[in-house]
Image: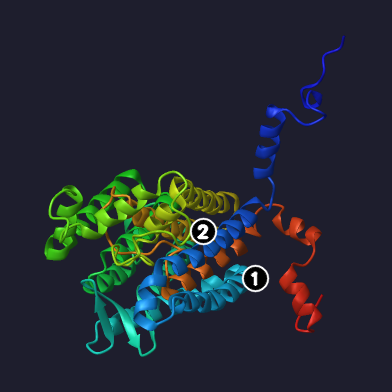
């Protein structure tokens, strides 16, 4: 009797080997990066909006009489950021390059405004915000986007001219420009954003192919700089000692960290259920911002945290895939820089919550509350979508798919051509 093919052994369904081959084939499609970025972004936004409501409901009910105050604000920021993401996804590369220098200058100006008494607002030992009455903005978030675009444009020009073979043209003016942004953020005592800016700087150098000796030297310099920032601020030293000795004075040095661990530990495998967590009942400070991952762990358990980690991992894979597959130097550098920004920020935030890194006070991208972080992040993700369309075969695949729902709606309203 003839052997039955593997794909026909179970009612004609493909066997395990064929399923693996089919899954690998999906990753080789032209629009894989595009759909990964879009899908991960939408799912993280939906999770974030849900968790902002859950994490802030108790505190806001006590403070404002409505459990939906921060939820409504976050929904408003999202309503502003999503059209910006859609617009960025349709911009040509030359537009992003044209934005590089104006964004850098604007970032420097607004970061200087933060340091002006009366304009800058301090909280938690750091001066990060400009107080505009009902709205507070955090200029350092704009500085991350500015460094990605400006650094990518600068290095792409130098690469085209063949000026990256020696250390001086490689670092000048990239290092002084990044240094100005880092210095202004440091003067505001914002260590978390400083780390992200330095990660973007190192990521650009890595992608452009900086010599190993130079890269190691700059990495060591960054380590020394971060050590100095920790030593000169007493509250940072307390955070570091609390991280190194979690069982020490938990009421002062590591109260937030220990409460975050208690929240995650109490979630177990599947969590206590959405809205059923206890940490937000005035136990865990800043539950809707810096420690929202702890609320995810408490209410959705280990499964929920693994979902968040998987989405961030897929986003990292998609960003690096875009950087690897495009041919334009600027596109490659900007994609890598934006990916380094979002992924390193997520790693630092999650690492602090689970106790493997000191607390630095930066939000979890797309999930934590805050419009100042959400809008630039969505614009950067829209930029990644625009770059994904430049991968080999992507434009042809998009043309074959036809216009998307947004374009069809605009066409129906007479605002866009079919």
Sequence-first disc among 1 and 2: 1
Tell me the residue at 65%/38% (across/down). 24
Judging by the rendered image, the residue that carries numbered circle 2 is 335
Residue 336 visible here? yes
Which quarter of the image is occupied by the C terminus?
Answer: bottom right
Which quarter of the image is occupied by the N terminus?
Answer: top right
- Image coords of residue 77 (percent x, y): 50, 77
Q: Nearer the viewer, residue 213 or 201?
A: 201
Mark 1 Cα shell of 10 Å, populated few (<14), some (14-19), many (≥20): some
Residue 138 visible here? no
The tag on residue 201 is none
Tell me the residue at 14%/53% (across/down). 241
Q: Nearer the viewer, residue 185 or 11?
A: 11
Q: Nearer the viewer, residue 31 or 371?
A: 371
Residue 202 lies in quadrant: bottom left
**Furthest residue toward top:** 1
For the residues bearing labels 1 and 2, Cβ distance under 8 angstroms: no
- Image coords of residue 235 (percent x, y): 15, 64
Give left or right: position of 127 versus 338.
left
The tag on residue 90 is 1
Give left or right: position of 86 versus 282.
right
Q: Secondary structure at mark 2?
A: helix
Q: Nearer the viewer, residue 354 or 80?
A: 354
Q: How does the figure colour the protein chain or chains?
A: rainbow
- Image coords of residue 334 (percent x, y): 49, 61
- Image coords of residue 19 (percent x, y): 70, 33
- Number of numbered discs on residues: 2
* Rendered position, 56 above or below 129: above
Inter-mark Cα distance, 1 to 2: 15 Å
Give left or right: position of 62 versus 411.
left
**Furthest residue toward right:** 1
């Amino acid at each position: 009797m003839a052997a039955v093919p593997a794909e026909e052994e179970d009612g004609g369904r493909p066997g395990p080997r064929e399923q693996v081959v089919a899954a690998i084939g999906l990753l080789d499609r032209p629009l894989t990066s595009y759909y990964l970025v879009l899908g991960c972004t939408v799912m993280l936004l939906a999770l974030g909006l849900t968790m902002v409501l859950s994490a802030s409901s108790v505190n806001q009910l006590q403070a404002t009489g409505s459990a939906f105050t921060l939820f409504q604000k976050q929904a408003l920021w999202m309503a502003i950021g999503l059209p910006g993401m859609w617009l960025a996804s349709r911009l040509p590369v030359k537009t992003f390059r044209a934005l590089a220098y104006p964004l850098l200058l604007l970032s420097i100006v607004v970061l200087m405004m933060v340091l002006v008494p009366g304009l800058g607002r301090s909280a938690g030992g750091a001066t990060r915000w400009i107080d505009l009455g009902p709205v507070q903005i955090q200029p350092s978030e704009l500085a991350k986007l500015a460094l990605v675009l400006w650094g990518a444009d600068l290095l792409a020009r130098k690469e085209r001219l063949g000026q990256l073979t020696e250390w001086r043209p490689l670092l000048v003016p990239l290092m002084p420009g990044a240094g100005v942004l880092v210095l202004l953020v440091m003067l505001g005592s914002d260590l978390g954003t400083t780390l992200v800016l330095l990660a973007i700087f190192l990521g650009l150098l890595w992608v452009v192919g900086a010599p190993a000796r130079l890269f190691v030297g700059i990495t060591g310099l960054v380590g020394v700089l971060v050590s100095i920032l920790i030593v000169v601020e007493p509250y940072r030293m307390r955070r570091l000692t609390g991280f190194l000795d979690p069982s020490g004075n938990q009421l002062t040095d590591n109260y937030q960290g220990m409460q975050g661990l208690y929240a995650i530990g109490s979630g177990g495998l599947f969590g206590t259920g959405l809205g059923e967590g206890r940490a937000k009942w005035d136990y865990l400070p800043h539950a809707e911002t810096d420690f929202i991952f702890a609320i995810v762990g408490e209410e959705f358990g280990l499964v929920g945290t693994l979902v968040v980690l998987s989405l961030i991992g897929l986003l990292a894979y998609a960003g690096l895939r875009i950087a690897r597959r495009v041919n334009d130097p600027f596109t490659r550098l900007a994609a890598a820089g934006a990916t380094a920004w979002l992924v390193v920020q997520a790693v630092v935030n999650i690492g602090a919550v689970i106790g493997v890194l000191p607390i630095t006070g930066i939000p979890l991208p797309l999930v934590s509350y805050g419009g100042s972080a959400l809008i630039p992040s969505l614009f950067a993700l829209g930029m990644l979508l625009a770059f994904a369309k430049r991968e080999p075969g992507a434009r042809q695949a998009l043309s074959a798919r036809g216009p998307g729902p947004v374009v069809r709606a605009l066409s129906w309203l007479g605002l866009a051509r079919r």
